[in-house]
Structures are given as structure tokens and as C-alpha cells.
Image (tube, rainbow, N blue to C red):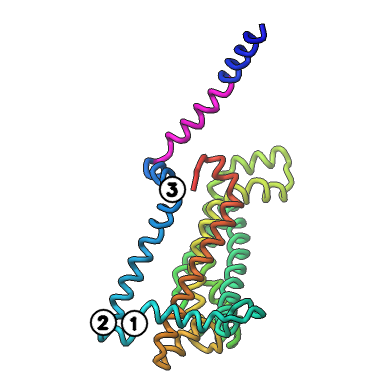
């Protein structure tokens, strides 16, 4: 009797768990072949594949530096990394093993880029939600939005210096003005894609406007908002350098100009190494935040990174 009951329970358990197992197998089979192939590789192989292209680029860089003519301007990777270590790092633990150039140039540049990005996020998301909810406002301000995004931002550097002086303010506002458009347009598109049905349903059930904003509008538009922020993040580093090329006393852009004027090509390539590391670090941190914030979206759409 006991064996029979045990066998019955076993069969019942297998019968209950089989649909779940089938669902897992179906999701695994639904993955693209390339993604399944990548998932089947071991992590050392994945790391090697990710480092393959950077290694090829460094190899080409080294070959160019060995040329008798190009080598005068293009320093070898060894020289650039040695200069990077000597300028931006130190052996002083009280300074967190960071060199003078990190405090004098890197931190001010990162601060300007992040300040401009923060302003662009706030303005782009707020204005984008307002325009996305109201089709009338979207049609009214659409020409102005397209006019602003088509303006060449580097050409407006003198205008921002004239309006805000020569301190950090014109640089920060130039960065914000230049990178706000991807966030704004993606927010408008994300809010507009929700449709009027959800908003009308919220009105029927008399859901407070605050709950509609934070429970319907922002979650529904957040994937496209993050896509716009990611584009603006990469642009912020470019505009950071451009804004520091004139009337600056510090920053990585200022350091690039000074190294060129002084024919210090080792220092010039060291700054380029810093920019590469900075771009990779920004992208890694942003992906970490995006995966945490949009974990619900990947689960709902059965997407895996």
C-alpha cells in the first residue's frame, strides 16, 4: 500500500512538473541559434573572444608606431600605458593610488559629463512625458525639437561661453543641450507607444495622476528611455572633450590640447587610453543599472542578455 501510494505520488509529481519542464525547453529552443551557441561556450572562451578585437587593435597600433615616419606621432602602446601609469596612478595609498592628473584633469571632466547627463535626463524625461501624453503638444513643438537636434553643437560653443561665462557652466550646459535629444525623442516615442487605451482606463477607474505616472507611464516607456540614455552617455564623453578644447584650465580635453602644443605625444596617447577606459567603465556601470531596473521587462518579454 505504501509503495503504491509512493508510486502514485511520484507519477502525480512528474505529471505536475512536466508542463514547467516543457515550458523551459520551449524557451530554450526559442532562443536564436547564435545565442544558444554563445551560451554553450565556457567563460574563458567568452573572455578570449571579447578580447580578440581589442588585441588586434593594439597590434595594429604597435605596427603603426614602429614606422619611421608615423612613429614620431603615434607612440607605441607600451609608451602610452607607461605614461598613463605615471600620470594618472601613484603608489600613495592616502590618495587611493591615484596620480595628480586624475585629480587635476580626470575628475573635473567626469564631473562635467555627469552633470550635463543628469540635466539632460531630467529635462528629456520630463519634457518627453509631457509631449508624449499630449498629441497636440507633440505636433506643436515637433518643429522646434527637430530644429534643436539638427543644430551642430560644437559650433554653439562660443554662444554658450557668451551666455554663461568661461567657467564650468557653459561646458555643462553645452553637454546637456547636445545630448538631451536622444533621451527626449525616445521618451516621446516610449510614452506615445503606450496608446490612449491605458490612459483612458486609468481615467475610468479614477486612478490618481501620480499612480498613473509612476505605475503606467514610466514603466511602459522605461525601456526606450534607457535606450536614449545609453546613446546620450556615449555622446557626453565626446561633448566633454569638445567643451574643454577652449577657455579651459583643466580637463582631459585641455590636456589633449596642451600635449599637442608641447609635442608631448606620449601624454596625448595616455589621455586617449584614459578615454577608452572611461568609456568602458561608463558602459559597464550603465548596463549594471539597466539590468537591475529593467529586470521585470526582460522577464515579461522572455529576453535574455
Marker disc for residue 42? 3
- Relative image position of residue 141 (x, y in whole percent): 54, 62
Residue at figure coordinates x 45%, y 81% from the top left: 82
The answer for how far apart the CA atoms under marks 2 and 3 are is 39 Å
Q: Residues within 10 Å of mark 1 (few under 14, many from 20)?
A: many
Marker disc for residue 74? 1
Name the secondary structure under disc 2. Answer: loop
The answer for how far apart the CA atoms under marks 1 and 3 are is 37 Å
Query: From what the image shows, is residue 118 above or below residue 243?
Result: above
- Relative image position of residue 180 (x, y in whole percent): 54, 66
Q: Which residues are magenta?
A: 16-32
Q: Nearer the viewer, mark 2 or mark 3?
A: 3
The front one of 298 and 2 is 2
Query: From what the image shows, is residue 104 above or below residue 212?
Result: below
* Residue contact between numbered discs 2 and 1, judged by CB atoms under 8 Å: yes
Q: Which one is earlier in the sequence, the residue at label 2 or at label 3? A: 3
Q: Residues within 10 Å of mark 3 (few under 14, many from 20)?
A: few
Residue at figure coordinates x 38%, y 77% from the top left: 77
Residue at figure coordinates x 36%, y 62% from the top left: 53
Q: Is 82 placed left or right of 7 in the picture? A: left
Residue bearing mark 2: 67
The front one of 119 and 250 is 250
Q: Residues within 10 Å of mark 2 (few under 14, many from 20)?
A: few
Q: Which one is earlier in the sequence, the residue at label 2 or at label 1? A: 2
The front one of 23 and 197 is 23
Query: From what the image shows, is residue 230 above or below residue 71?
Result: above
- Relative image position of residue 87 (x, y in whole percent): 52, 84
Query: From what the image shows, is residue 1 above or below residue 183?
Result: above
User: Dividing the picture into quarters, in which one does residue 116 lie?
Assistant: bottom right
Amino acid at each position: 500500500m505504501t509503495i503504491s501510494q509512493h508510486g502514485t505520488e511520484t507519477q502525480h509529481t512528474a505529471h505536475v512538473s512536466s508542463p514547467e519542464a516543457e515550458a523551459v525547453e520551449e524557451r530554450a529552443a526559442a532562443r536564436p541559434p547564435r545565442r544558444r551557441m554563445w551560451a554553450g561556450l565556457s567563460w574563458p572562451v567568452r573572455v578570449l573572444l571579447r578580447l580578440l578585437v581589442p588585441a588586434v587593435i593594439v597590434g595594429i597600433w604597435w605596427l603603426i608606431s614602429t614606422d619611421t615616419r608615423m612613429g614620431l606621432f603615434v607612440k607605441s602602446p607600451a609608451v602610452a600605458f607607461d605614461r598613463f601609469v605615471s600620470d594618472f596612478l601613484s603608489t600613495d595609498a592616502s590618495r587611493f593610488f591615484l596620480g595628480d592628473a586624475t585629480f587635476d584633469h580626470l575628475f573635473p571632466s567626469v564631473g562635467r559629463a555627469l552633470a550635463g547627463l543628469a540635466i539632460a535626463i531630467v529635462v528629456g524625461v520630463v519634457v518627453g512625458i509631457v509631449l508624449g501624453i499630449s498629441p497636440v503638444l507633440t505636433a506643436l513643438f515637433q518643429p522646434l525639437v527637430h530644429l534643436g537636434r539638427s543644430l551642430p553643437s560644437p559650433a554653439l560653443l562660443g554662444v554658450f561661453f557668451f551666455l554663461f561665462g568661461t567657467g564650468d557652466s557653459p561646458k555643462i550646459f553645452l553637454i546637456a543641450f547636445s545630448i538631451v535629444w536622444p533621451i527626449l525623442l525616445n521618451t516621446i516615442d516610449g510614452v506615445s507607444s503606450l496608446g490612449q487605451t491605458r490612459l483612458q482606463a486609468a481615467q475610468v477607474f479614477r486612478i490618481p495622476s501620480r499612480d498613473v505616472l509612476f505605475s503606467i507611464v514610466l514603466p511602459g516607456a522605461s525601456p526606450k528611455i534607457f535606450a536614449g540614455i545609453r546613446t546620450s552617455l556615449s555622446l557626453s564623453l565626446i561633448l566633454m572633450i569638445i567643451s574643454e578644447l577652449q577657455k579651459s584650465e583643466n580637463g582631459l580635453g585641455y590636456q589633449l590640447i596642451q600635449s599637442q602644443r608641447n609635442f608631448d605625444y606620449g601624454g596625448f596617447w595616455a589621455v586617449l587610453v584614459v578615454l577608452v577606459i572611461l568609456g568602458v567603465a561608463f558602459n559597464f556601470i550603465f548596463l549594471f543599472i539597466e539590468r537591475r531596473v529593467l529586470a521585470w521587462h526582460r522577464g515579461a518579454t522572455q529576453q535574455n542578455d
